[in-house]
Amino acid sequence: MSLGKEKAKQYLEANEEAIKNIEEIIQKEQIECEFKRKDAYVFTQKQDEIPKIKKEVEVVQSLGLPAEFVENTELPLKILGAIKFPNQAQFNPCKYTQGLIEAMPNVQIYENTKVIDLKTEENGYEIITENENKINAKYVVIATHYPIINIPGYYFLKMYQSLSYVIGAETSKQELDGMYINSEEPTISLRTTSLEDGKNLLIVAGMDHKTGEKKDLSEEYEKLIKIAKQIDPDCKIKYKWCTEDCIPLDKIPYIGEFSNLMPNVYVGTGYKKWGMTSSNIAANIIVDKIMGKESPYQEVFTSTRLKPIKNYEEMGNMIKEVVKSLIIEKLKIPKKELENIKKGEAKVIEINNKKVGVYKDEKENLYAVKPVCSHLGCELSWNNLEKTWDCPCHGSRFTFEGKSIYDPSIQDLDIIELE
């Protein structure tokens, strides 16, 4: 409600409208993506969270949308209360995306064509790829998860990234009728989907943290597995993966004009872990703008805003990390300095005020990089679970070999030769 009751209502209505729009597309195009209407729950296992949940119920009801406080759910977990949002939706996003592609036979989609720059031309824009191909366009939509263009726009001052972990467990238990997420930290999300062999897949996600945070992450999957075993002791862990999300400092996605200085360039980003509905909202707002129309929801998501920033603590921490993390020098070091690194581990070694990040694999092969993000020069942290170098400033991520795998970085890390 920090934006006021009217905008809060528009935000909720935009997301409800997005669910309806997605369902209409699925029905019209006959996309098989396991779309199901399900109730969504935000639950708690802590007594001091109950007043907050009850207050949220009152707020949502005051905005004209259905919500209710419940004390019992189908989860085989002890909960103290939950807010129930009826008639939400669940579907397979990969199958949905493939269905959208098949529904657009005249649209050309080019994969493996990384964009590294955008230049202003007399009649529009020139888009440059890493293979030095050039594409001319009057309209450009930057939908790169985290915008790869720093200036203008300055999205690196308005967002950070959060890393979450997910497991998929095969279970013979009945499919859950609802979708669940807890209100306290660490965040845990629970849902199920049916498999072709008649069994179900239990999906447990959470343990989110700011990307690049210096902490031991080695047990994050085990924590999720423990929760899955509470629901079904006989479940079989089939999948493990992690995912990264852009989080705006004021928690509202950025959708619309990329910058007042770049007409006809649009952006959709900062979906804060709600990408299915937010991406649909973004698509409709941006299409309306290109067609010269006005969306009733565009003001809520105005992408050129900088104020008000409500979370000053996060803003301050981000700037401090940018400043204190800057390092600029390359380094070559003797191998004798690396003998204390264990197999499967990495360290940032400092010699004569110079730094190098070194990873040793299980065969004792060494991989050395300059541990400085290629985006804006922040010092990287080692993720000991995913075996990646992660940026604490804006969330770029790199393999232990130095390959860029997550935006906003578009360049690999400098490789350091070991003598």
Image (cartoon, grey):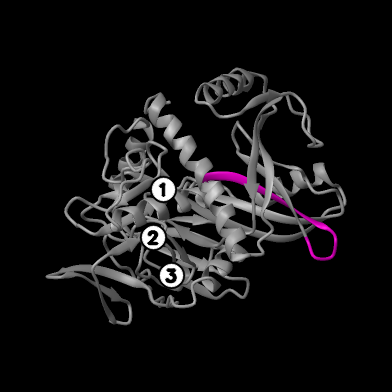
Q: CA distance from mark 1 to mark 3?
A: 26 Å
73 left or right of 280?
right
384 left or right of 257?
right
Q: Which residue is mark 3?
A: 402
Q: Is residue 344 visible?
A: no
| Residue type at numbered disc 1 | Gly
Q: Which residue is mark 2?
A: 143
Residue 67: image quadrant is top right
Residue 62 in the image: above or below residue 84 = above
Discs 3, 2 touching: Cβ within 8 Å: no
Q: Is residue 103 visible?
A: yes
Residue at 30 percent across and 42 percent down: it is 319
| Residue type at numbered disc 2 | Ala
Residue 106 in the image: above or below residue 97 = below
Q: Position of residue 51 (x, y in %)?
A: 60, 17
Q: Badge 3 local density, few (<14 within 10 Å), some, or many (20+)?
A: many
Q: Secondary structure at mark 3?
A: loop
Q: Which residues are magenta?
A: 195-209
319 left or right of 6?
left
Q: Which residue is mark 1?
A: 270
Residue placed furthest toward the front: 28
Q: Position of residue 308 (x, y in %)?
A: 29, 32
Magenta span: predominant SS is: strand
Residue at 81 percent across and 43 percent down: it is 231
Q: CA distance from mark 1 to mark 2?
A: 10 Å
Residue 11: image quadrant is top left
Q: Mark 1 or mark 2, which has the lower sequence index?
A: 2
- Check residue 14 for magenta coloring: no
Q: Secondary structure at mark 2?
A: loop
411 left or right of 357?
left
Q: CA distance from mark 3 to mark 2?
A: 24 Å
